[in-house]
Image (cartoon, rainbow, N blue to C red):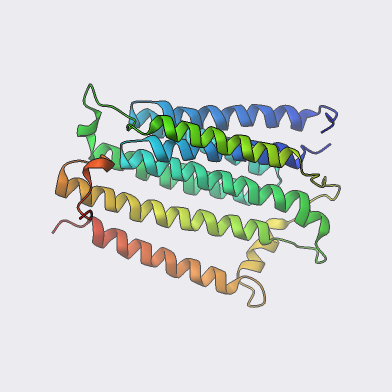
Amino acid sequence: MSIPQVTVSHVVFVILSAIALIGALGVVTTRNLFRAALFLVLSFIGVAGFYILLEAEFLAMVQILVYVGAIAILIIFAIMLSQRLMAPGYKASNEQWLWALVAAVALFAALAFILLNVGWPTAEASVPQGTVAELGKALVDPDQYLLVFEVASVLLLAALVGAVVIARER
Amino acid sequence: MQVPLSWYLIVAAALFCIGLYGALSRRNAIGVLMGVELMLNSVNINLLAFWRHIEVATASTPAALSGQVFAIIVITVAAAEAAVGLALIIAVYRNRRTVAIEDVDMMKL
């Protein structure tokens, strides 16, 4: 792999990877689950930065709205509702953490070995203007992704009803 | 000069493996769910990196968007999964006063 010329986007990429990976490491290593949730927000914001770097601005906004605005808040609510677990002396990791670490490192080594040995094409083409409008049209176009869109809405409705039924006081 | 595709794939692989470690090693069910969310995020980075570097360059139609649509569907499913998963955790906590995964073994014979 030849080292390409360093530009602003490379520097931004390195900063964003540092944000995303430090956030992710915080999620899995912090003992306090509430702090882990805040690290998760940091990681999500780093990933949203990747989307902007990849010129998928709509996805970056969706990432901030759905992950940071909804999922992270939902997780923090669940942590607050099961507060008793934050008692002192509480162990955050189970007895198989060492095997989990070995498995994760081995998987990363295998993936990195494969990824670095493939001749990936480089992008010469630029993203056309106005992809957000095109995306909106494609999602409700019967010839493209209308069925996917409808299935996603049914899935969200089912998840909504299911979550209410499961979490309801009986 | 674009950031090469392999850089995105390496960072996404690292994020996936960190999430895998979290999902396997946490005692708290909410911690496991956070690891799964990290893994889903890394998949989305992969989808959008492939979209940007391969689909945009090789598509015949002017608007090639299946990578973005895939990522939107993954985010939708992740939101549904988080809602149902956290509802399950709250229900288990209400019944058993714990969300430690080794204590939730009612379905074991």
Q: Is residue A9 left or right of residue B94?
A: right
**Residue B106 vs residue B85, the one in the foreground:** B106
Q: Position of residue B5 (x, y in %)?
A: 74, 42
Q: Is residue B84 visible?
A: yes
Q: In the rendered view, tell whether residue B55 sits above or below residue A98.
A: below
Q: Position of residue A126 (x, y in %)?
A: 82, 49
Q: Position of residue A151 (x, y in %)?
A: 49, 70
**Residue B104 vs residue A139, the one in the foreground:** B104
Identify the residue at horizontal 62%, vertical 51% (top origin): A58
User: Image quadrant for the N terminus of chain B?
Assistant: top right
User: Image quadrant for the C terminus of chain B?
Assistant: bottom left
Q: Position of residue B62 (x, y in %)?
A: 80, 63
Identify the residue at horizontal 24%, vertical 48% (top origin): B90
Q: Is residue B70 left or right of residue A80?
A: right
Identify the residue at horizontal 66%, vertical 50% (top origin): B48
Q: Is residue A43 left or right of residue A137?
A: left
Residue at the extreme bottom: A142
Identify the residue at horizontal 27%, vertical 60% (top origin): A164
